[in-house]
Image: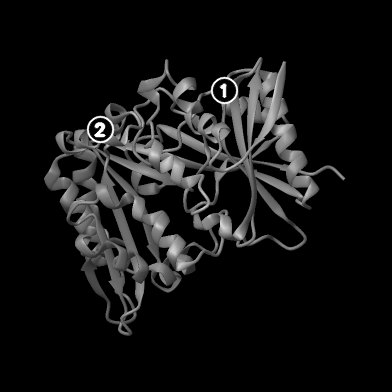
């Protein structure tokens, strides 16, 4: 017998909600990166700034009294809806490979969202796109990288069985050191041959010792850059800083760079990070084992995000701002993950096809 119960924040059931992935991935540890449990507890505490502008509910599936699945539903009042549409989200989905469990979870989630006026459901969106989102749809046997959406390979099929369709898809690439060399040379050349920006632009490496200030400074630029991206939501500077700061321990000199116009406004930014996935596997969610992070050495670098003001996207700034990250990566002599691009990235695609893909699914309420 499968039943779905509502879970309150800071409850004993919430502990089971948080710890469920460790149970479901116990035989798939090579394909999953366990987060810090204390970080997960903070996400599902009343102190999470997301909860100040959202309605939400956490649901836990029990089969014969044992936790076997979970789903989190939310309505983000900062989410920018299309005209005549109200989108609700499901996220943090996990379950055993069981049609009944999935059907019960999705049915309860949909009922909760439809009762509150939602006309569409999208997911998985874990709170918002500033946190984490998407199901991995291919490449499940590849080694995961830090920040990558990872899930059992049967999750997309369960969503499709419950009436969901693919809304949008993203891709990631694996690039060899040789690929990085060629891309770096291309970047350096394009930065000098492409048309220069229309005004004087200053490029500066972010001060990693003042990271909070550096992130706050790019807030306006990031929201302007991402406003046409899938899942855009308005977000406060404090919540934006909190969400982006999770990358702080994994940045390295040259990995975070910003460009400024003559008015000293941030008009572009780029960042990558060391892939500490193997260290997180050793830590296995236990905060007391964080010292293992210092003893681990990354084996690759993740090129994560590039944002640039629309007025500068056809100029050499697109390449110029990437120079420090490319050069620093080349000096490290490490392979790269070209992470989570919405379209087929032409620069990456010249070397190979993407090795992983990810999708957001959606369902429209039947009239």
- What residue does disc 1 label? 154
**Above-or-below relation of 130 to 358:** below
Query: Residue 9, position in %: x, y?
Result: 57, 43
**Above-or-below relation of 203 to 1:** below
Q: Nearer the viewer, residue 337 or 183?
A: 337
User: Residue 35 bears which disc, if any?
Assistant: none
Q: Residue at x 27, y 47 (%)?
A: 273
Q: Is residue 160 left or right of residue 351?
A: right
Q: Residue furthest left?
A: 331
Query: Residue 21, position in %: x, y?
Result: 48, 27
Tell me the quadrant of the picture where the C terminus can be found: top right
**Above-or-below relation of 287 to 236:** above
Q: Residue furthest bottom?
A: 263
**Above-or-below relation of 184 to 12:** below
Tell me the quadrant of the picture where the N terminus can be found: top right
Q: Residue at x 69, y 45 (%)?
A: 121
Q: Residue at x 55, y 65 (%)?
A: 234
- What residue does disc 2 label? 289
Secondary structure type for disc 1: loop
- CA gap between label 1 and label 2 equals 31 Å
């Amino acid at each position: 017998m499968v039943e779905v119960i509502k879970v309150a924040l800071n409850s004993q059931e919430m502990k089971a909600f948080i710890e469920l992935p460790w149970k479901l991935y116990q035989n798939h540890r090579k394909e999953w990166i366990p987060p810090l449990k204390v970080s997960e507890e903070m996400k599902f505490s009343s102190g999470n700034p997301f909860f100040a502008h959202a309605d939400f509910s956490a649901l836990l599936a029990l089969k014969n009294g044992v936790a076997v699945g979970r789903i989190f539903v939310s309505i983000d009042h900062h989410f920018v809806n299309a005209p005549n549409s109200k989108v609700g989200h499901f996220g943090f989905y996990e379950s055993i490979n069981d049609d009944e469990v999935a059907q019960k979870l999705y049915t309860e989630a949909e009922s909760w969202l439809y009762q509150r006026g939602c006309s569409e459901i999208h997911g998985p969106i874990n709170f918002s796109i500033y946190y984490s989102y998407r199901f991995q749809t291919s490449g499940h046997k590849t080694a995961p990288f830090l920040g990558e959406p990872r899930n059992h390979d049967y999750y997309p099929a369960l969503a499709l069985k419950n009436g969901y369709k693919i809304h949008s898809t993203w891709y990631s690439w694996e690039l060899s050191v040789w690929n990085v060399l060629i891309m770096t040379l291309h970047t350096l050349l394009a930065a000098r041959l492409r048309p220069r920006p229309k005004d004087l632009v200053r490029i500066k490496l972010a001060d990693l010792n003042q990271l909070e200030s550096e992130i706050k400074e790019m807030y306006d630029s990031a929201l302007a850059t991402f406003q046409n991206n899938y899942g855009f939501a308005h977000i406060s500077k404090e919540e934006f800083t909190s969400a982006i700061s999770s990358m702080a321990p994994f940045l390295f000199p040259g990995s975070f760079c910003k460009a400024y116009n003559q008015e000293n406004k941030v008009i572009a930014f780029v960042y990558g990070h060391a892939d500490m996935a193997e260290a997180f596997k050793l830590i296995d969610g236990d905060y007391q084992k964080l010292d293992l992070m210092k003893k681990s050495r990354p084996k690759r670098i993740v090129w994560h995000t590039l944002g640039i003001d629309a007025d500068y996207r056809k100029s050499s700034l697109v390449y110029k701002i990437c120079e420090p990250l490319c050069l620093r990566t080349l000096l490290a002599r490490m392979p790269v993950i070209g992470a989570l691009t919405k379209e087929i990235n032409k620069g990456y695609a010249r070397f190979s096809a993407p090795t992983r893909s990810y999708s957001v699914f959606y369902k429209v309420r039947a009239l």
